Image: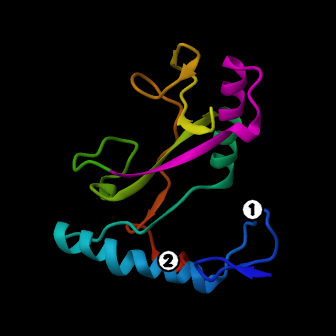
Amino acid sequence: MTNDSNGIENKNSNNSSQLPAAFIQKLVDNYRNNQLALINQNMAMDDAHSIWFDLVTLKNFIAEIETEALAIDPAVENKDLGIRFYYAAYSPEMQPPIPSNYSKKHTLVMVPTKKEEGLNYDFNPFQEEEGKALAVTGIALAQNHGDLVPPGASIVESY
């Protein structure tokens, strides 16, 4: 076993979905003590520090990415598809179905990506330009609006 530059023990060379809990806590603490503290202080608010999505929503989004990508490029392989998570913030003026207590808070927007020539491009199967699908205008395949904490109860969080 080896340790990487962050002190994380690597049991093997594959992409494991396991991280030490102490490392996760350190990352969360770093964010809360630095970025979140500055945001809350400078914007005089209690910004969101986590977001939750149910597995059904995530699996459906992944399935839709796969289906739509295959519809425009039957040769695309799953290894060339991915999801980019954009940090985002809700506007001060909220529109349903987004609750008004989400106003100005952090959120995530997930957009599909497709690898071309070794680069993971944002990918919108609803808009094609010379064989390359880009999310630029109109409707884009994306996912947003999980449950934010706050305003949700932080009692459900471990970190």
Residue 21 drawn at (x, y percent)? 63, 83
SS at badge 1: loop
Q: Could you tell me which residue is drawn at 41 percent across and 26 percent down?
A: 136
- The picture places residue 53, in percent across and down from the top left corner, at 57, 56
Residue 125 inside the magenta-drawn segment: no
Q: Which amino acid does label 2 sit on?
A: Leu
Q: How far apart are marks 1 and 2 (CA)?
A: 19 Å
Which residue is label 1 attached to? 15
Depth check: give the residue in front, 29 or 51. 29
Q: Which residue is drawn at 55% across and 31% down?
A: 123
Residue 68's disc is none
Task: Say which amino acid is labelled 1.
Answer: Asn
Q: Which residue is drawn at 55% across and 76% down?
A: 156
Side (left or right) of 73 relative to 120:
right
Precedes in sequence: disc 1 or disc 2: 1
31 lies left or right of 122: left
| Residue 27 tag number | 2
Residue bounds of the magenta highlight: 65-89
Q: Is residue 90 above or below residue 96?
A: below
Specify whether residue 158 is in view.
no
Asked which secondary structure carries label 2, the reply is helix
In the rendered view, tell whether residue 154 sits above or below residue 115. below
Name which quarter of the figure residue 47 lies in.
bottom left
